[in-house]
Image (tube, grey):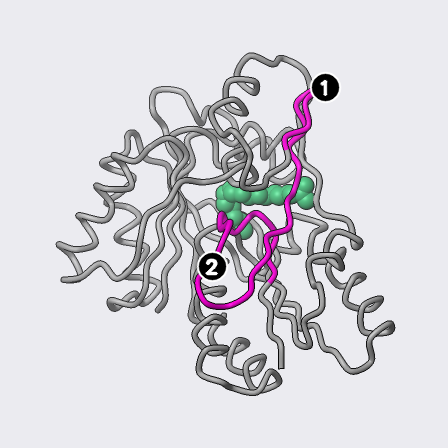
């Protein structure tokens, strides 16, 4: 039986070891420029274009056809999307599943709404990968995944909420004043998959301490961690050091946000996915 994992580009992953994988790009639209969030995206060119541009910018989720192409000839597809609470990507994947399964009654598509983004999606994909490699049957994998997703979390420290507010993804009142004087909004992905602000802190040092407190509150006990950042490797490294000091280990990795997460988690922001 051929298995495949497919996610949209909000996962920040462009490849995966040992299990067939495809990333379906979202698009970042900056005036005339259409940045396709695939492995060829020039992140620094995108950020330069964004900071020089004064007009309206936005993003677009994949069409059902793009999803279907990515499903390919797999017998069982596991498809992980960015939260349905903030994007149409999940609805588009659901439409793709319906068409695909009608055309191929002997094949199955399991869609997982991450209710999150970035590093939490990457944790979900990593878990799928290990279950597929353990030769588990696909319906059983789907069950295991439903339980696993209850144990994964996303916290973030955002340096600006401008792009989120301008695109109607967060209340403009919450966005006010963030970005000035190094103010960070600390928050989490809510159970409904929306952005839930928790605290404000000035500077990365205080933001990191606050993130550690929230990790404890959410029941972190040394499970896997993935940190992603937008042009702020020092903060990601410092967070890793604090996790090591506080919990005795750092079981995970750091990587850079790609196009979609980098557009909304603006420069200097950090995202933190972990298991409880
Ligand atoms: O165009 C589209 O369909 C994509 C819209 C995506 C909107 C939200 C992206 C969030 C990226 C920002 C901070 C984390 C918030 C997480 C809440 C679930 C990262």
The residues colored magenta run: 6-35
* In the image, residue 182 lies in the stretch drawn in magenta: no
Residue 78 in the image: x percent, y percent? 61, 69
Q: How many C-alpha atoms fall within 10 Å of the one at disc 1: few (<14), some, or many (≥20)?
A: few
In this rendering, the label closer to the viewer, 2 or 1 = 2
In which quarter of the view is residue 179 placed? Answer: top left
Residue 86 horizontal side relative to residue 39, left or right: right
In which quarter of the view is residue 269 placed? Answer: top left
SS of the residue under disc 2: loop
Q: Is mark 1 within 8 Å of ligand 1?
A: no
3D distance between C-alphas at marks 2 and 1:
32 Å
30 in relation to 209, above or below: above
Q: What residue is shown at x 53% (from left), y 35% (from top)?
A: 174
Q: What residue is shown at x 60% (from left), y 32% (from top)?
A: 165
- Quarter the N terminus occupies: bottom right
148 in relation to 259, above or below: below
For the residue pair 275 and 21, the one nearer the viewer reads as 21
Residue 153 horizontal side relative to residue 62, left or right: left
Q: What residue is shown at x 21% (from left), y 41% (from top)?
A: 238
SS of the residue under disc 1: loop
Q: What residue is shown at x 60% (from left), y 31% (from top)?
A: 172
Residue 122 horizontal side relative to residue 29, left or right: left
In which quarter of the view is residue 204 placed? Answer: top left
- What residue sits right under mark 2 in the picture? 16
- What residue sits right under mark 1 in the picture? 32
Residue 2 in the image: x percent, y percent? 62, 76
Q: Quadrant of ligand 1?
A: top right
Rendered image: mark on residue 261: none
């Amino acid at each position: 039986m051929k298995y495949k994992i497919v996610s949209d580009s909000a996962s920040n992953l462009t490849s995966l070891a040992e299990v067939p994988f495809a990333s379906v790009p979202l698009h970042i639209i900056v005036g005339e420029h259409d940045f396709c969030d695939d492995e060829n995206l020039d992140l620094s060119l995108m950020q330069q274009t964004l900071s020089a541009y004064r007009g309206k910018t936005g993003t677009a989720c994949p069409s059902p056809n793009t999803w279907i192409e990515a499903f390919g000839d797999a017998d069982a597809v596991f498809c992980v999307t960015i939260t349905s609470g903030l994007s149409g990507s999940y609805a588009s994947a659901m439409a793709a599943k319906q068409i695909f399964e009608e055309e191929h009654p002997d094949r199955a598509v399991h869609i997982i709404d991450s209710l999150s983004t970035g590093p939490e999606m990457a944790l979900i994909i990593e878990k799928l990968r290990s279950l597929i490699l353990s030769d588990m049957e696909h319906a059983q994998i789907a069950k295991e995944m439903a339980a696993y997703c209850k144990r994964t979390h996303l916290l973030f420290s955002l340096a600006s909420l401008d792009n989120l507010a301008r695109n109607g993804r967060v209340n403009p009142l919450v966005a006010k004043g963030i970005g000035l004087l190094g103010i960070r909004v600390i928050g989490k992905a809510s159970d409904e998959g929306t952005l839930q602000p928790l605290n404000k802190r000035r500077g990365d040092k205080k933001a990191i301490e606050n993130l550690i407190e929230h990790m404890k509150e959410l029941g972190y006990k040394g499970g896997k961690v993935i940190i992603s950042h937008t042009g702020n490797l020092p903060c990601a490294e410092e967070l890793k050091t604090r996790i090591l000091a506080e919990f005795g280990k750092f079981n995970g990795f750091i990587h850079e946000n790609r196009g979609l997460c980098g557009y909304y988690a603006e420069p200097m922001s950090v995202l933190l996915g972990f298991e409880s």
